[in-house]
Image (cartoon, rainbow, N blue to C red):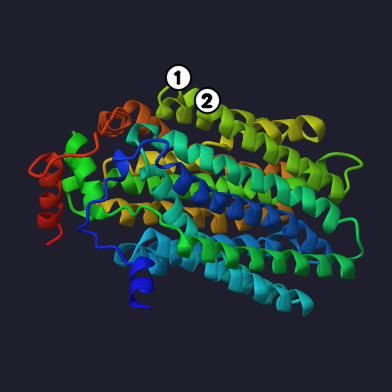
Amino acid sequence: MSDFWKKYSLRTRDATRTSPSSMTVRQSLYPICLVTVLFFLWGFSYGLLDTLNKHFQVVLQIDRARSAGLQAAYFGAYPFASLGHAAWILRHYSFRAVFIWGLFLYGVGALLAIAAIKAASFGGFCACIFIIGNGLGSLETAANPYIAICGPPKYSEIRINISQAFNGIGTVVAPVMGSYVFFTFNNEQALANVQWVYLAIAVFVFLLAVVFFISNLPEITDADMAEQALERDISGASSQPFRKQYRLFHAAFAQFCYTGAQVAIATYFINYATETRANTSNALGSQFLAGAQAAFAIGRFVGVVLMHFLRPRHVFGLYMTLCMVFLAPAITQHGNVGLSMLFVTMFFESICFPTIMALGMRGLGRHTKRGSGWIVAGVFGGAVVPPLMGVVADRRGMGMSMVVPLAFFIVSWTYALAVNFAPLYKNTIDAFSQHTTTAGVAPGSDEEKAASAWEHQSR
């Protein structure tokens, strides 16, 4: 029995070197594919939330500002995970432990949601969504840095955007399903259908947790990241204390603003379609949302292709700029024109979140695990911006409410400008993008020195 627990232990010493950056693309394929399943999961959950937002407005007769409580509960849970319990587990145990913990919370929240739906309690359902948000926040805290680190560093942005593309597929599937499951039945039957959806989710995530427990995933430690940073840290920032990682805090703030804007647009997309386009039902609006989410997913695959030929920071700067360019007309141009602008905006939103994540972690060294939690915590913007947009929409209409996400896009754009024009940002990012690592380094070499440096710095 002791051999069993030793074999499947969830704890990895942070001073241990596992050299994840020395893995070839083929060696990293299985762990990346398994973790990518998680990206689909929270994409599906996020897309389902946007559809449920409109569904509960209809069934429970609540206004748009109050319905945004779903997003506030979901995204408001992220800092509790990424800066709290999930961050603690990640630093003291392992990535695999966080994956299992996040799936457990997701499953528990899904089961409790069934009871809340039966009671037709919006407040109770929001509480369940908060638990699910903690689970998904835990998964994101571990999955994003894991994908970015597991494999050759120069492909970091490409890997994370490919994985996030499956997140985009999840966001397409959910509203398509919602258009047929929620909006084509009477209210009582629709609520019953939602219960079955959450039961299926619970069963699936518990089974997936078992798969993660028995899988032999390569671990990534602070010593590994110290080694990588020592090889390519031009500015010496990785040796600075955490409070002086200013590039990280800028990335986290940009993530807060960007995510808030993205979530706000998706949250009220169906409202925008039904209120600004003639003869558009809720079911048709949900199908339009699925189409926009498909554009979002396609944008990620296109972004990955572009990153083979251009620097990821250049692609990010272009996409971020075009988000603002195409969102602005949706404020005054309604109907098919306004919807078309939102479709194109969501296409260009596609790579922004994962690329901010990957670029923000560049050069953090031993601070990588902690730093990734701060960037993931930026998802909290999804709890702040939608209620603001809902208030404006209730008072001034859906078109004018698009001013809110536009303002947050502009603030997030400062990070896109910094990584492309500020030397402190772009030199560090480019050094790691060009990084190559060789496996099998002998004792006493740079790898050994990196581990010694980490041990000295962690005292």
Residue in the image at 40% along x and 54% along y? 217
Residue in the image at 52% along x and 44% along y? 408
Tell me the residue that label 2 is attached to: 305
Left or right side of 194 for 34: left
Rendered view: 201 above or below 435: below
Secondary structure at badge 1 equals loop
Which class describes the residues within 10 Å of circle 2: few (<14), some (14-19), or many (20+)?
A: few
Q: In which quarter of the image is the N terminus?
A: bottom left
Instruction: Please name whichever residue, 260 or 309, is drawn nearer the observer in this view of the structure.
Output: 309
Locate residue 222, reporting x and y percent.
Answer: 25, 54
Q: How far apart are marks 2 and 1 (CA)?
A: 7 Å
Contact between marks 2 and 1 (CB within 8 A): the answer is yes
- The amino acid beneath tag 2 is Val
Tell me the residue that label 1 is attached to: 309
Left or right side of 189 for 125: left
- The amino acid beneath tag 1 is Phe
Secondary structure at badge 2 equals helix
Instruction: Please name whichever residue, 87 or 453, is drawn nearer the observer in this view of the structure.
Output: 453
Q: Quadrant of the C terminus?
A: bottom left
Residue in the image at 78% along x and 77% along y? 118
